[in-house]
Image (cartoon, grey):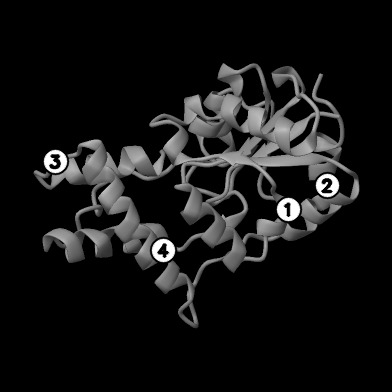
Amino acid sequence: MGLILFDIDLTLILTSGVGRKALDGAMREMHGIEGAFEAVHFAGRTDRSISSEGLARSGLDDSEASILALRAAYIENLARDLATPGCPIARLPGALELLERLRGDGRAMALVTGNWREGAWLKLARCGLDRFFRAGAFAEDGASRNELPPVAVERAARAFGRGFRHEDCWMVGDTPDDIECGRTWGMATLGVATGPFGAEALLAAGADEVLGGLSDTEEALLILGGDPR
């Protein structure tokens, strides 16, 4: 059986703006700038790309060194915020049940996410979902999401001790960018309309299948239950 690649934010978890808050806090602490990311579009993008735009919009150097310095401050803020009682981040309905069933069926799963690696694991751990994933591709692996799928497939092959053909993989995500990055590499795509994009937008982006969410475990399993082709 093939590999199932999952996005994280607004596909598996409801982030409630914790990433934006942590980035804004990092910019405030480092440069004294308030609301640096208020006008920055986040959905479907990588943290590397988002960080670069936020720095440039603020009139700051967006070199690799500046991005990495911002990354360190962001991760520190995110870890602190996620450890705060009452932090609003949470699993989306059905995410835990689906991952449990897929793992029970012996399905290989990995991540394709725009989060920095540390941020991805922090968010997943806070929601009790980190235990389902052994590999993935993250923001440090490419500025564009389209660069990430082959990285995730290669790492999953090492983690599971077997190769995966791109055409046997599913990409699951909530944005047209998730759909595009899967299609770019010949993967089947499942759009999940739990973020800012509805079913029509995901279908228009070329999604092979679309669900309103992951709460109907049996329907999701019917789609993801075998090789896509």
At 60% across and 18% down in the image, what residue appears?
A: 185
Look at the image and tell me whether residue 94 can be seen: no
Dot 4: element:
helix
Name the residue carrying label 1: 132
Where residue 196 appears, as percent x and y from the top left, is 47, 46
Q: Is residue 180 above or below residue 42?
A: above
At 70% across and 56% down in the image, what residue appears?
A: 95
Name the residue carrying label 4: 18
Q: Nearer the viewer, residue 95 or 153?
A: 153
Dot 3: element:
loop
Task: Please name which of the two marks, 3 or 2, marks the residue nearer to the observer.
Answer: 3
Q: Looking at the picture, which amino acid does disc 1 mark?
A: Phe
At 26% across and 51% down in the image, what residue appears?
A: 69
Q: Looking at the picture, which amino acid does disc 3 mark?
A: Asp
> Marks 3/2: CA distance?
44 Å
Where residue 61 appears, as percent x and y from the top left, is 13, 41
> Marks 4/1: CA distance?
22 Å
Q: Quadrant of residue 20?
A: bottom left
Q: Give whichever of discs 2 and 4 has the lower sequence position.
A: 4
* Label of residue 61 in the image: 3
Q: Give whichever of discs 2 and 1 has the lower sequence position.
A: 2
Dot 1: element:
helix
Which image quadrant: the C terminus? top right
Please state if 184 lies on the left or on the right of 99 as rendered.
Answer: left
Where residue 217 appears, as percent x and y from the top left, is 81, 51
> Marks 2/4: CA distance?
28 Å
Q: Quadrant of residue 67?
A: top left
Q: Looking at the picture, which amino acid does disc 2 mark?
A: Leu
Where residue 194 appears, as percent x and y from the top left, is 58, 50
